[in-house]
Amino acid sequence: MRYASLVLGTLLILSPGPAAAGDAPQGVRVSDAGHKAQGPEIALGPDGAVYVVWIDEDAAPKAVDPQHGHSHMAATNLLFARSTDGGRSFSEPVQVNSKPGEVWGFTVSKPRITVGANGTLHVFYPANDVNPGNGKPEAVALYTRSTDQGRSFSAPQRLNTMASTDASHLVHGGLTHAHVFGTIAVDRKAQVYALWTDTRDMTRESDFAKVFMAVSRDDGQSFGKDAEVFPGDVCPCCQLTAFVDSRDRLFIGSRQVEGTLRDSTVAMSTDGGRNFSARQRIVGEQRWSIEGCPLKPTSVAAEGGNLYATYFSGGESPAGAYFVRSTDGGANWSAPMLAHPGALTSDAPVVALAGGTLHLFWHAKVGDGPRRLYTRASTDGGAGFGPVTEIPAPPGAAQLPVVAGRPDGSVQLAWQQGTEIRSMAWR
């Protein structure tokens, strides 16, 4: 393990490095060799097991009825692998979805995975379906779970109510409706929260989405009827994020539309998702005006009175990945901090807590080369950060990092390396 100290004010920062000397210096391949993979997600079990899911593009398109095709068609599979040795090796990938090619998967609307305190795996994924009322294609929200560490998965449950209207003239690509760009979280009481952006009430006058949620109070065995959480002013193509802290508070990251502005926001529920606070706009004074959907999520983490968020902004100068924090439970937010000064471009930021360490990860271009992965960390609740450090990924494009924190301050990282998924432990 390598260390190089940097004194930043009164804060001693240790430069990041592989979490253990035996780790592969450039991570290990998780996805099948020769398969086109994208959109990884990661979670850690209470026993330290590492779980990774991703989109496999090698599904046969013939699995989808061509008469229900549309310009945003995706016929992919959801694959899963686990590690029981701290991420040094992974099991052979297995397919999670029951129907080959049913996953409506993209890097911007990808499957999500989380693990409960009892070890149950919870997976949300978007899927292709057909509306029974009009016979047109509809992208739906599906859920499955595993109670045996991913050796088997339950039959999928559709969480959204099928729309009775037809918005194919409004929803891009010819879909009659979409219940996608979703996320999932679980608390210590085994209450499971699945949320997605929803077009069922979309109109020509307001072609934005609502956020709907379905909740399970029995560890995912069953879900209540889906219900509206946020009204029709949500960016319809920006994937939601969810985070549950040690107090079982549920935080939702989303983008709210106001005219041409697409602001990152955070909302909180303290009663099991029954009620939410007003969404708090967390961006600075330089708000991002954009004609169209930016396809950008807002990553959130929290502990005690400290809330953390990171997002891409095209309104700041320069445009790029920014970090903000609140020390009063979300009432006020700091000025945005550029994660990577000097980068030509930076994007796809994520924030994660690991013990007493706060980690930021993102991808960026520095010079003429491809996108690479970068990180920096804070041990004082985001008041100060250590140096920007490049992750030692293999040559080529490395992008779309996802991360899960361990109590010892290290994290397990996964990312898209070209057309494969890789993972490593990082301290």
Image (cartoon, helix red, strand yellow):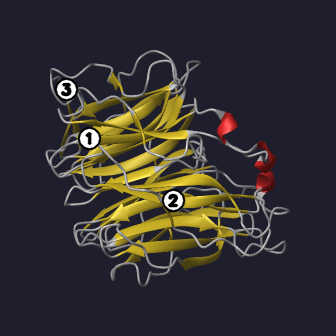
Q: Which residue is mark 3?
A: 4
**337 to the left or right of 87:** right
Which residue is at 23% across, 45% downward? 9
**54 to the left or right of 169:** left
Q: Which residue is mark 1?
A: 50
**SS for dot 2:** strand
Which residue is at 65% across, 39% downward? 63
Please tell me whether mark 2 or mark 1 is closer to you in this view.
2
**57 to the left or right of 54:** right
Task: Kindly check if marks 2 and 3 are in contact, taking CB atoms under 8 A apart as contact.
Answer: no
Cα separation, mark 2 vs mark 1, equals 22 Å
Residue 156 versus residue 341: which sits nearer the camera? 156
Please tell me whether mark 1 or mark 3 is closer to you in this view.
1
Residue 169 versus residue 223: which sits nearer the camera? 223
Decide which of tag 1 and tag 3 comes sooner along the chain: 3
> In the rendered view of the protein, which quadrant contains the N terminus?
top left
Q: Which mark is residue 142?
A: 2
All told, the count of numbered labels is: 3
Coordinates of residue 412 in the picture (x, y in percent)? 28, 38
Task: Kindly check if marks 1 and 3 are in contact, taking CB atoms under 8 A apart as contact.
Answer: no
Residue type, numbered disc 2 = Leu
**Residue 84: quarter of image:** top left
Coordinates of residue 285 in the picture (x, y in percent)? 58, 63
Which residue is at 44% across, 78% downward? 224
